[in-house]
Image: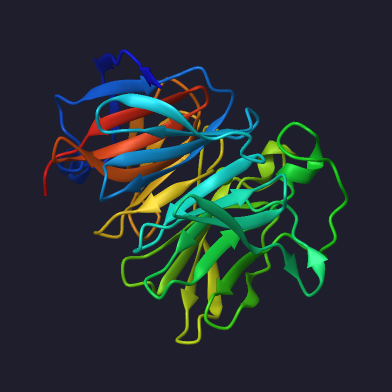
Amino acid sequence: MTAAPVERTHVEYDVLDPSFRRLVAPDATLDRLYSGMTWAEGPTFFADSGAVVFSDVPGNRMYRWSADGTVAVHRSPSRFGNGNAVDRSGRLYTCEQGTRSIVIEQDGRVDRLVDSYQGRRLNSPNDVIVDSRGRVWFSDPTYGIDSDEQGYRAPSELDGNYVFRFDPASSQLSVIVDDMVMPNGLALSPDERTLYVSDSAVTNDPAGPHHLRAYDLSDDGAATNGRTLFEVDPGWPDGFKADDAGLIWCSAGDGVQIHDASGRKLGTIRIPETVANLCFGSRRGRPTLFVTATSSLYAIDLPSR
Ligand code: MG
């Protein structure tokens, strides 16, 4: 266990719309809580303990930052764990690129939830969310099977890179989105009527998408009316979250970009490393944004709302 010294620097913002100033604190500091990872990803906040679990994907480890400032290895090897999510019961869901599956951790046990679709192995689940009904939504691009760097090189067994939804009540796995090249981050709007998914295919093809798309969800959960909300520049969109007001806080090459639900960019929180993902949580009773960016886990206090 390591009590890492926190490095504090002033946060820089690019303000494009006046409403952005209400979302951030002018005097906030960018706190580097931990560093030394290869590609930090998948932060998720445990409301009961105030801890943040996150992944170092190529490093093949998961870490736990605790509210007292200590950092411990949470799982090693993590089987190239990437995105993480916590459900309402405090169970931890992880995308394991090495086993090409979604696993669930409860009471110290890690069990496989789903690893195949119609008898064929998944590609390499990348990011995961759990909705209010306990259904598990995840993206399944090929990053974990394209090379041995963050998984094991292998051919895809599927005929596309999909966003899936797994219903634990029926054990049914459904394709929800099938029109993306490299689906990556995903989030639901606060009313769970809109699904947002990022496509980061520009990482493998300079002409590939680097945008975020929205889909209307019908009562049975089918996604319709897919439309591109915005492109991320510089870089590409990886993980992101929707806040309580429906604003989208999105990873980008220059930091965390905040867009409204129509896709309009309100501003950017500058981060000195390429951002992979983020989550909301709290520290010392204050709302906090946690950010995984390349080698580091960062935290920024947000205004109380
Ligand atoms: Mg990702």
- x and y percent of residue 105 in the render? 50, 54
Q: Residue at 59% of width from left, 45% of height from top?
A: 210
Q: Quadrant of residue 151?
A: top right
- x and y percent of residue 287 in the render? 19, 42
Q: Residue at 59% of width from left, 33% of height from top?
A: 76
Is residue 30 visible in the rendered image? The answer is yes
Q: Residue at 26% of width from left, 31% of height from top?
A: 300
- Report the colour scheme: rainbow
- Determine whether, in the image, residue 204 is placed left or right of residue 159: left
- Determine whether, in the image, residue 146 is placed left or right of residue 188: right
The vertical placement of 35 against 49, above or below, is above
The vertical placement of 132 against 205, above or below, is below
Quadrant of the picture in which ligand 1 is shown: top right
Q: Quadrant of residue 281?
A: top left
- Determine whether, in the image, residue 164 is placed left or right of residue 100: left
Is residue 267 visible in the rendered image? The answer is no
Instruction: Work out which quarter of the rendered image holds the N terminus and state it.
Output: top left
- x and y percent of residue 80 in the render? 65, 39
- Determine whether, in the image, residue 107 is placed left or right of residue 224: left
